[in-house]
Structures are given as C-alpha cells and as structure tokens.
C-alpha cells in the first residue's frame, strides 16, 4: 500500500512537475501580438509615369525593423511586444502604380499576415496618396482586404503623411489614425512611433479601440508648397494639433492637407480625432477643421514664385549666393516623372551660361541612362555627348542633347544607381541612371560639386528640404510644367468633389460638423 502510495505520489509529481514551469513560461510570453504592414507612395495621376513593384523596395519579416529606429534590437518597444512584421514597402513618389504591382504586393502581404494571425494589433504604415491604375482609394481597398484576413477584433493603428488622403472606408477600418504635423516632415519617425505607442498602450491597458472617431472632410485642395508648416497660416493651424491630442479623453488628432495631383473624390483635406470622450472628440475635430477652413485664403507659396524666366533673371542679377531655384513642376518627390527636360533646355539656351566662366549653376537632375553609359565609356575629364530625359514625360520638351566634359562618376546610390556630373558652359548637370531626388548636401558633394560655392542651384523639388533650406542665401519657386504642376488651376480635374476651394470662387460655407465613423467591428 505504502509502495503504491509512493508510486502514485511519484506519478502525480511527475505529471504536475512539468506544467508548472510551462505555465510560468507562458505567462512571461503573453506579450501583445502585433503585425506590421504597409505600402507608401505618393503617385500622380497627372504624370504619364508608371510605378512598378521593384520601386517599393519591399522589406519582409525582421528586415522591416530597420525602417524604425525605435524598434531597434535593443529598444524598449521591441521587447514589449511579440512583433510579426509582414511586408513594408516605400517607393519614391512617381506615376500611378500598375495594377499588377499593387495586387502582387497586397497579396504577398495578406499571405504573410495569414501565417501568424490572430493579432492583438496591426501597425499600418502608409503614406496615403497611392494611385493605382484602374482602382480608386487603394489604401481603403488595402485595409479592407487586411480586415478580411485578420478579422475585426484586431486594433489597427495607421500612420500617414499629411499629404495622404483619408477616405471614409479607411477611417472605418482603422481604429487609431494619425499623420505628420510638420512639412517638411521632420517629425516622420516621431509620428510612426506615436502610432505604435498608442497602439501598444490601448492593448496593454485593456482599453481596446477608442470609442469614437470623428471625421470631417474639408473642401480644400492645396499643393504642399502652399502649406509648409514653417510659415503661416499652416504653422498655427498645425501647432494646434499636439495640444489638442493630449487632452483627457483624446487619443490622437490629425489634419491631412491631402494630395493635389490625383483626381479622385477622396482628394481633399480631412481632420480626424480619436478618443473615448464623445463630446471632446467631436468638438476638437470641429475646432481644428474650422481653423483650417478659416485660414484657406492665407495659404501661399513658401517662397517667392514665378516663371522660370523670372526665376533665372532674379538669380543671375542677385548677389546672394547660393541662389536656389525650385524646378517644381517635375518634382520627383511629389510624383513628377523627374525626366522633364523643359527647364534644362531653357537654362542651356541662356547666353549667361554659355561661357565656362559664366555664373556657375548646378542642375539636379536629369535621368539619362545612355548618356551615363557614354560618360562611363569616355571617362572622367573627357568629352561626352548624348541624349537625356523625356523618356517618360516628353509632353513639354523632347530628349535633350548634352555635350560637355565628364566631371565625376559615382556608383551605388540606391535610387540613381550611377550618377554623372557633366559640365556644359558654366552649368554642372547631374545625369543619373535612374531618377533620384537631391535633398542633402552630401548628394552634391559626393559628386565633387559644392552647392555652397555655386552661384545658382536648380533642383527638381518643391519646398527646400532642411539641409538645402539652411544653406540657401535666397530662393525662388519656379512654376515649371510637369506632372506635379503647382498651378492646380491648370490641371484637368474631373472627379474631385465640388465645390472645392480654390477652384470654386464663390462657394458657400461648408458643413464642418464632426461625423462619427462606425467602429471597425460595428459596420
Ligand atoms: Zn508629404
């Protein structure tokens, strides 16, 4: 009997010995399960360019973490959550995304998300201004398809660019939503981090989805270059967002300027506020929306603006060096094809730049793969000639013939792949294998060019990015033609909602009362 008892005790002991550490283990591992997915691009439907899948440089699984310094291996947020990064892709702005590329990236994302479902949360990292050939509101479509895979219980937190568009469908399917508060977007990473922190906080605290999401469409459509938060009125309009978002009962608040170079009903400004206090959520949204509407007449270009001829005349006559000119109509970071030759043709035709001792001008940039090959074959210091540009957008000028001396050849840029500086008269032209934005001083100095010592620097850009802005002695925005023409009234809109400021001059006061969006599990 005693033997049996001991035996039974031993057996029971063995049976129970295992589960104890197992249970402890399980408890320790009960971290929130959060997936990460998203696609970011700003794509113009007024540009003949198309964007393919490779342009998104999609990252999968653990590689996704490299997009977010706040999720680095040793960061606190990395260890608070069991992360399931699926796919995140970011493309330079460009023309509409092909339907094939979009379907491929979305289907891949959905497959990857299926593998580890269910999730407590999903961080949806998008820009919000993607245009896809033959499909309206791609971000709304994408999040709806994600919901079909992960279900309606998961809390989705979306972060966006303030130049993105928020459709009602996107608002319905997301639970938390926010966007940048600065343009230029110096707070991009801070915004993404806030979206992730708010998501974790709602899961860990057990509060779940915010009870209210207020949405207000503002019938205003403006180019980003009129809404920089460095100057009024956008400065004050956006400065009100952070204080609004930290009120008790509010989770987050955001204002979207929207994206002006696509022709869809969703293209307009939006305010959204999320939180648990119904009154405060609605009133806060209404206040931010009214502020924006009241400020509409005051939005103006961030710099003096004019035609290219006016810009060049002013720059040549000025004693302020370096004098920056934004060649804004073909700005590749807004969605221009980046290969319009019109401005370069005008510059090379000016007598002032024909002589190599004329005012030095750096032109950034023009894609020209054949000319790059010719330059490589010729070598640095040698003469080169050939055509560049107008492969994608030849509506304003044909490919341009460039004949000059090769100053430098640099390999390895992620966007340009190969960059060549060619000197024609007193102009240093940057010719690239593929299109690339020039936003940093190092983009120039790597090529042996010194923008601080140049008389004039012409860049395909809208408002100057911080490093260029800091070094400019003067600056003018040239209203040049291209896929992202800053003069919106020249664009052939057909499908945006009307009336819309500034197109409809005598419009009535719009309804700026807050609409409460159904929660993602209630529609
Ligand atoms: Zn933006």
Image (cartoon, helix red, strand yellow):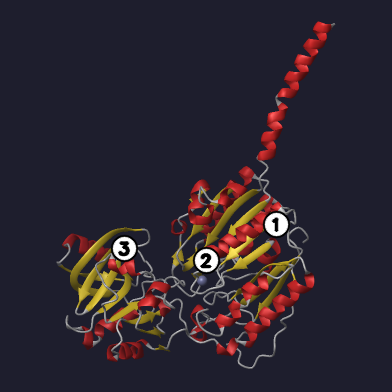
> Which residue is at a point 46% across and 67% down the rendered structure image?
93
Which residue is the site of mark 3? 433
| Position of 491 relative to 8 (above/below) | below
> Which residue is at a point 69% across and 61% down the rendered structure image?
175
- Could you tell which of marks 3 and 2 lies nearer the N-terminus? 2
Task: Confirm whether residue 119 shows in the render.
Answer: yes
Between 236 and 48, which is closer to the camera in this rendering?
Answer: 236
> Which residue is at a point 25% across and 64% down the rendered structure image?
372
- Could you tell which of marks 3 and 1 lies nearer the N-terminus? 1
Which residue is the site of mark 2? 188
Between 231 and 400, which is closer to the camera in this rendering?
Answer: 231
Give residue 481's position: percent from left, percent from top.
41, 82
Instruction: Please report contact status of discs 1 and 2: CB closer than 8 Å, yes or no.
Output: no
Q: Quadrant of residue 255?
A: bottom right
Which mark is drawn over residue 202?
1
Give residue 83's position: percent from left, percent from top.
59, 47
Give residue 373's position: percent from left, percent from top.
24, 61
Q: Distance of mark 3 from mark 2, alpha carbons? A: 28 Å
Q: Nearer the viewer, mark 3 or mark 1?
A: 1
Instruction: Please report contact status of discs 3 and 1: CB closer than 8 Å, yes or no.
Output: no
| Position of 81 relative to 402 (above/below) | above
């Amino acid at each position: 009997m005693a033997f049996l008892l001991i035996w039974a005790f031993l057996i029971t002991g063995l049976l129970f010995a295992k589960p104890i550490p197992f249970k402890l283990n399980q408890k320790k591992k009960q971290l929130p399960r959060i997936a990460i997915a998203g696609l970011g691009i700003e794509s113009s439907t007024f540009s003949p360019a198309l964007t393919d899948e490779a342009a998104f440089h999609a990252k999968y699984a653990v590689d996704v973490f490299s997009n977010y310094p706040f999720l680095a291996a040793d960061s606190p947020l990395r260890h608070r959550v069991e992360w399931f990064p699926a796919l995140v892709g970011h493309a330079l702005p460009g023309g509409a995304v092909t339907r094939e590329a979009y379907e491929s990236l979305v289907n891949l994302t959905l497959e990857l998300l299926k593998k580890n479902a269910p999730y407590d949360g999903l961080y949806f990292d998008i820009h919000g201004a993607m245009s896809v050939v033959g499909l309206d509101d791609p971000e709304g479509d994408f999040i709806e398809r994600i919901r079909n895979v992960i279900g309606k219980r998961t809390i989705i937190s979306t972060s966006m660019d303030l130049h993105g568009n928020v459709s009602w469908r996107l608002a319905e399917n997301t639970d938390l939503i926010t966007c940048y508060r600065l343009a230029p977007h110096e707070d991009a990473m801070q915004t993404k981090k806030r979206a992730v922190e708010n998501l974790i906080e709602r899961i860990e605290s057990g509060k779940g989805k915010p009870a209210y999401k207020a949405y207000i469409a503002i019938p205003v459509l403006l180019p980003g270059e009129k809404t920089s938060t460095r100057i009024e009125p956008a400065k004050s309009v956006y400065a009100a967002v952070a204080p609004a978002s930290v009120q008790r009962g509010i989770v987050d608040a955001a204002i979207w300027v929207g994206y002006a170079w696509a022709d869809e009903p969703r293209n307009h400004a939006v305010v959204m506020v999320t939180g648990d206090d119904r009154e405060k959520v609605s009133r806060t949204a209404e206040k931010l929306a009214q502020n924006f509407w009241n400020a509409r007449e005051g939005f103006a270009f961030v710099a003096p603006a004019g035609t290219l001829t006016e810009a060049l005349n002013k720059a040549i006559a000025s004693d302020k060096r370096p004098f920056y000119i934004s060649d804004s109509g073909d700005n590749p970071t807004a969605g221009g094809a980046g290969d319009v030759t019109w401005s370069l043709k005008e510059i090379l035709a000016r007598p002032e730049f024909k002589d190599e001792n004329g005012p030095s001008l750096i032109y950034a940039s023009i894609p020209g793969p054949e000319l790059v090959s010719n330059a490589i074959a010729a070598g640095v210091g040698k003469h080169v000639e050939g055509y560049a540009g107008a492969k994608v957008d030849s509506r304003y000028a044909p490919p341009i013939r460039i004949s000059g001396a090769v100053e430098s050849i640099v390999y390895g840029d992620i966007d340009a792949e190969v960059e060549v500086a060619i000197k024609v008269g007193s102009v240093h032209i940057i010719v690239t294998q593929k299109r690339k934005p020039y936003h940093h001083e190092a983009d120039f100095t790597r090529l042996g060019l010194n923008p601080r010592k140049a008389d004039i620097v012409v860049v395909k850009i809208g408002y100057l990015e911080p490093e260029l802005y800091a070094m400019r002695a003067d600056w003018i925005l040239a209203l040049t033609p291209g896929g992202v023409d800053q003069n919106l009234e020249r664009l052939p809109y057909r499908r945006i909602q009307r009336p819309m400021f500034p197109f409809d001059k005598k419009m009535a006061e719009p309804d700026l009362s807050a609409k409460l969006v159904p929660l993602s599990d209630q529609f």
